[in-house]
Amino acid sequence: MAAATQQAENFSSVAWSYFIDVREDTSEEFAKQQELYSKYAKTYDEWASEEEYSGPKAVATKILKLYSNEKNIKILDYGCGTGATSDLLSEHGYQNIDGLDPCKEIIDVARSKGKMQKLYQLKSGDDDSVIPSQEYDVVCSSGVLFCSASHPGYECLTDIIRYVKPGGHIIIAHRQVDSCIESRHVTDLAFLDNDVKQGKIKVEAKEVIDRWRRPANTLEGEDIIKGELLIIQVL
Ligand SMILES: C[S@@+](CC[C@H](N)C(=O)[O-])C[C@H]1O[C@@H](n2cnc3c(N)ncnc32)[C@H](O)[C@@H]1O
């Protein structure tokens, strides 16, 4: 019985006990979330495959479409986790990929794969002056925004816009905002209206991803969770 219980405990079975609370103290909430990623860093990729999590593929496919003949572009994966997106991109010849993630253990897994260059241990809202302005052709992100109340929302786009070269793209995949448990973060893209009006960015598309992943447990219902793919060009 003990063995069965142990076997059943994996990332998806425990994730919501780490994610579900909307606490008064947001730093406590974030610390709990990071504890989860640290604990399951080495088995995270197995979970992603079991849940048929499709975010990294959606992002990589879009990058391939937009930059099929430009394999030397410089890419930053925001909230890179174990490097699932860079795993896919490197299969297609992209090698100039950096990552950013607050979780040391998960960064260690990404580093061990040897597919990314620089790895920044940072979270949204941190002092990010170590990242030069207009450094990247593409900043991508999958499964970070709206993953839970302690993950960021669209407000992190303000920082991300700074990292992108004029003409470059921001490609963000996230679970559908409507399917999120309560978010205290910015969920409305109208937040970017001023940047659009001032000609700084253009929101090129917001596409639905029909199969984001299977629900992790009963709290998420039974339906396949949908996602969204947001494509912004920095002008
Ligand atoms: C569900 S994982 C997705 C990882 C990877 N992008 C993928 O698709 O497999 C969410 C990642 O977001 C990172 N994260 C959480 N809060 C963050 C924040 N405020 N800023 C940047 N990354 C964050 C976590 O450490 C974790 O690695």
Image (spheres, rainbow, N blue to C red):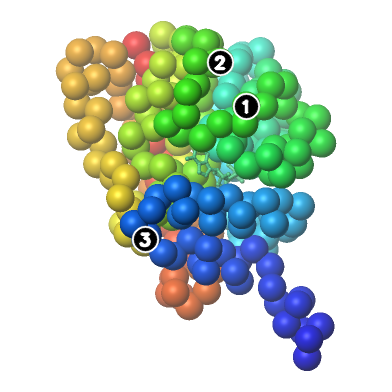
**Quadrant in which residue 84 is drawn:** top right
Location of ligand 1 given as a quarter of the image: top right
The amino acid beneath tag 3 is Val
Q: Position of residue 225 (x, y in %)?
A: 45, 61
* Image: 7 above or below 184: below
94 and 102: which is toward the camera: 102
The amino acid beneath tag 2 is Val
10 Å crowding of disc 2: few (<14), some (14-19), many (20+): few
Q: Residue at x 55, y 28 (%)?
A: 63
Q: Position of residue 180 (x, y in %)?
A: 37, 58
From the image, tell me which residue sits under label 2. 130
Quadrant where the image shows the C terminus: top left
Q: Residue at x 82, y 36 (%)?
A: 112
From the image, tell me which residue sits under label 1. 120
Mark drawn on residue 133: none
For residue 195, side relative to residue 57 (left or right)? left
193 and 79: which is toward the camera: 79
For residue 64, side relative to residue 195 (left or right)? right
10 Å crowding of disc 1: few (<14), some (14-19), many (20+): many
10 Å crowding of disc 3: few (<14), some (14-19), many (20+): some
* Residue 48 visible within the image: yes
Q: Badges 1 and 2: C-beta atoms under 8 Å apart?
A: yes
Q: Position of residue 211 (x, y in %)?
A: 49, 57
SS state under label 1: strand
SS state under label 2: loop
Spatial separation of the CA atoms under disc 1 and disc 2: 9 Å
From the image, tell me which residue sits under label 3. 22
